[in-house]
Image (cartoon, rainbow, N blue to C red):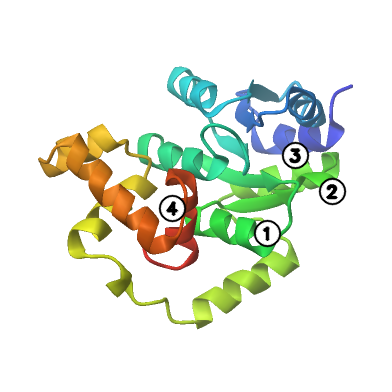
Amino acid sequence: MHNPLFMGYFRKKNSVGVKKTVLVVDDHEFVLAALAALMNSPVLQVYTAESSEKALSICKAYTIDVAFIDARMRPTSGIELIGMIHKKYPTIKVVGMTSYTEKATILDFIAAGVVGYVPKLKLNQALFSDCLQAVLAGQTFFPEEVKKMIAELSSKAHPTKTLLSAREYEIAKLLCTGNSAKEIADQLGISKNTVDDYKKTMLEKTNTKNSSELVSFLHRNGLV
């Protein structure tokens, strides 16, 4: 069944008949199918991806207007994927999704630069429609409790960056925008092994276990 909420809006905004394109990314196939069904409409072209790799291939092949991305995926997390999309396809508007409502995950989304956030457990056609309309109009879309988090963050000074050396900070910024160790090495004119050594040191300093946790830590603590 088509979604009348989307049709009513886009008939007014899109009289030439050009569909808006939406990408939904989630590594659970049944969840992915359910989310895509919520957007079923003749005025929307919906693509789905169960991995970051497939999501990037879709972004390369098609012009995507809005991407709804789940936070927790493997092996590449949704937070890392957002950084990659911002780097390669900066015009795509990204909305974060998660079944986990803990503050840390939402803060990771905010730090990653999403323009909206929707809790998957509360999703319905009306919420999706409201979110999609807002972000396509150049607005943000956050629940009231998330807006309060954003306000609190903006009122606090960020932690000092002295935790990282100048070179570590340089590498950290590149990691957070989705660059691989080899890409960072090429950009900085150093070897991949050197980048790996710096990364290992940063993992130790931040008490994190892998790149995903490191990136989340750096964003969450205002270090990049």
Residue located at (38% from left, 40% from top): 178
- Residue name at image x 73 percent, y 32 percent: 11
What SS does tag 3 mark? helix
Helix or strand or loop: what does disc 4 sit on? helix
Q: Amino acid at mark 2?
A: Lys
Distance, label 3 to label 2, CA atoms, is 22 Å
The residue most toward the right is 1
Whole-percent x and y of residue 117?
66, 52
Residue 166 sits in quarter: bottom left
Camera-near label (3 vs 2) is: 2
Indicate which disc, 4 or 1, sits on the residue closer to the N terminus: 1
In which quadrant of the rendered view does residue 101 lie? bottom right
In space, the residues marked 3 and 1 are separated at their CA atoms by 20 Å
Q: From mark 4 to mark 1, how far is it between C-alphas? A: 25 Å
Looking at the rendering, in which quadrant would you find the N terminus?
top right
Q: Mark 2 falls on what kind of element?
A: helix
Q: Earlier in the sequence, mark 3 or mark 4?
A: 3
- Callout 3–callout 2 Cβ contact below 8 Å: no
